[in-house]
Amino acid sequence: SVCRYFTGEYSVMTLSARGMVNNNTPLKVFVAAGHNEFCQVYSVSLGRERIPSESGVRNRNVNGTPGQKPPNGQSKIIFQVEPLKKVQIDYHPKEPYGKVVRISNNNKLLASGGDDGNVRI
């Protein structure tokens, strides 16, 4: 499945994604998108959108067998995108441009580099 998310008036110049693995929660991915002098961090997770049947009855089993996939049209997988934080990553006085963003393996740090010649963590 493909998802589009409008990030604003700026082009996305660089992108970094890191999954958050926890057996007790659904899959969640942190995405850092570099937009000119800024970096926007997003949380992306998978969700399921239930489509009600025409009769309004929700069947818990398919053909009497639990755990079977429902027929097409009863549910679909959707991406849930939530903007988290926006930070400035380049302070070049004439034309700021962040060239790279990366998320650390533990999802706690964001590193960036840009035209101003500095690496920021």
Image: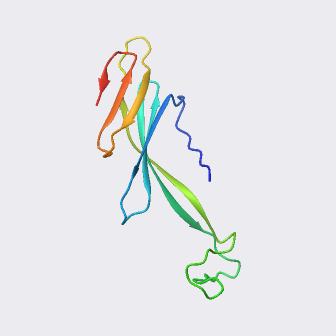
Asked if 85 appears above or below 93 in the picture, the reply is below
Toward the top, the furthest residue is 94
**Horizontal and vertical percent position of residue 10:** 53, 28
**Horizontal and vertical percent position of residue 45:** 47, 55
Asked if 41 appears above or below 68 in the picture, the reply is above
Is residue 85 in sight in this rendering?
A: yes
Toward the bottom, the furthest residue is 64
Horizontally, residue 107 falls left or right of residue 32, namely left
Quadrant, the C terminus: top left
Is residue 89 in sight in this rendering?
A: no
**Horizontal and vertical percent position of residue 80:** 50, 54
Q: Which of 111 and 12 is in front in this view?
A: 111
Toward the front, the furthest residue is 105
Color style of the picture? rainbow
Tally of numbered discs: 0
Horizontally, residue 6 falls left or right of residue 112, namely right
Asked if 106 appears above or below 80 in the picture, the reply is above
Asked if 72 appears above or below 110 in the picture, the reply is below
Q: Nearer the viewer, residue 107 or 52?
A: 107
Q: Which residue is drawn at 42% across and 11% down?
A: 94
Q: Nearer the viewer, residue 12 or 20?
A: 20
Q: Residue at x 65, y 72 (%)?
A: 74
**Horizontal and vertical percent position of residue 82:** 45, 49
